[in-house]
Image (cartoon, rainbow, N blue to C red):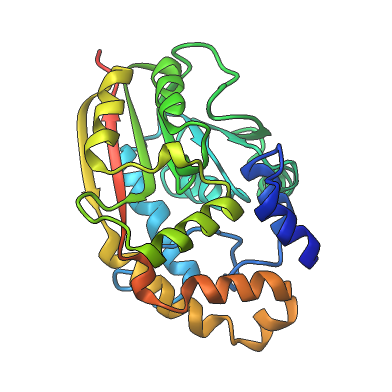
Amino acid sequence: MQLSQVISLFLRPPRGGAGAIYDLLGTNNHLGEQSLYLNMGYWAGVDTYDDACQALARRLGEAAQLSTSDEVLDAGFGFGDQDIFWMENFQPRRICGLNPSPKQAAHAQKRVADRGLSDRIQLRVGSATEIPHAAGSFDKVISLEAAFHFVTRERFFQEAYRVLRPGGRMAIADMMPLEGRPFRAVERIGDYIGRRIWQIPQVNMYGRTPYMEKLRAAGFTSLEWRSIRDVVYAPFARYASQRLNDPAVVARMDPLMRAYWRASTANERAYDPFDYAIVTAEKPR
């Protein structure tokens, strides 16, 4: 990634939104040793990024109550790590994934094919706010650390409700402002810069109460919210600040992206204004 590209992302965000950002990231700008996960992980009882990301995928799969009879929609599948994990560990009947990044989709498709899972995992370029499937197509809708990108998250809720079968369940691992904790001046600046680069719409910046209200307005019931911020943000920042000095990471990671990762994780307190929750909801029978 060139400096001019980073400046352009900030001053003139691409029309492709988050998909364009993740196209630029490629397969080199991640923190894993054996995986291509790009989430912050669940750090209870684990020590490595790969294990933390897999633990988060497991927690979300459990929250979704994935079972062998399920047809699942994954909104924002990244490089496909979680879909392979869910298939191998929960064994749902089928997983269909949507992702706005053509490069991520192509790489994920190859990884799925290499594991011999193409008949049960279908990953494609597409939008979570215009889901290209008929109403009532899925038993579960799941989204791992992606919904804050969607334009808008509220529209995603409506689409998820439409494609779920009656009695279907949605599970989301998501980031949002911490309710009752206003941003300080310097935090507002950091938040603005981060949102511009990572393509997070301002309209998605709301806390728990509006989040649950929007789910109810979409038709969902049986809402549950579990904040896991204490086992996400601080341990992720501590690990990342050390991992970015690993010679293997230095050798493969784009220098500008490494600098951005470093700036994003240099201070654990930078995440103080944010919550991180696993949210579940159901479509009434």
Q: Can residue 26 be seen?
A: no
Residue drawn at point x = 67 percent, y = 51 percent: 21
Q: Is residue 211 above or below residue 8?
A: above
Of all residues, the one furthest to the front in this rendering is 185
Residue drawn at point x = 58 percent, y = 81 percent: 244
Q: Provide residue 5's location: percent of width, then percent of height.
A: 77, 58
Q: Provide residue 3's location: percent of width, then percent of height.
A: 77, 67
Q: Can residue 112 be seen?
A: yes
Closer-to-camera residue (209/159): 209
Q: Provide residue 147's location: percent of width, then percent of height.
A: 46, 40
Quadrant showing the N terminus = bottom right
Residue 113 lies left or right of residue 273; in this view the side is: right
Residue 92 lies left or right of residue 59; in this view the side is: right
Q: Provide residue 198's location: percent of width, then percent of height.
A: 58, 52
Closer-to-camera residue (212/270): 270
Closer-to-camera residue (79/129): 129
Residue drawn at point x = 26 percent, y = 66 percent: 230
Closer-to-camera residue (82/251): 251
Residue 177 lies left or right of residue 5; in this view the side is: left
Query: Disc count in the image?
Result: 0
Quadrant showing the C terminus = top left
Residue drawn at point x = 37 percent, y = 75 percent: 268
Q: Is residue 284 above or below residue 97?
A: above
Q: Is residue 124 above or below residue 269?
A: above
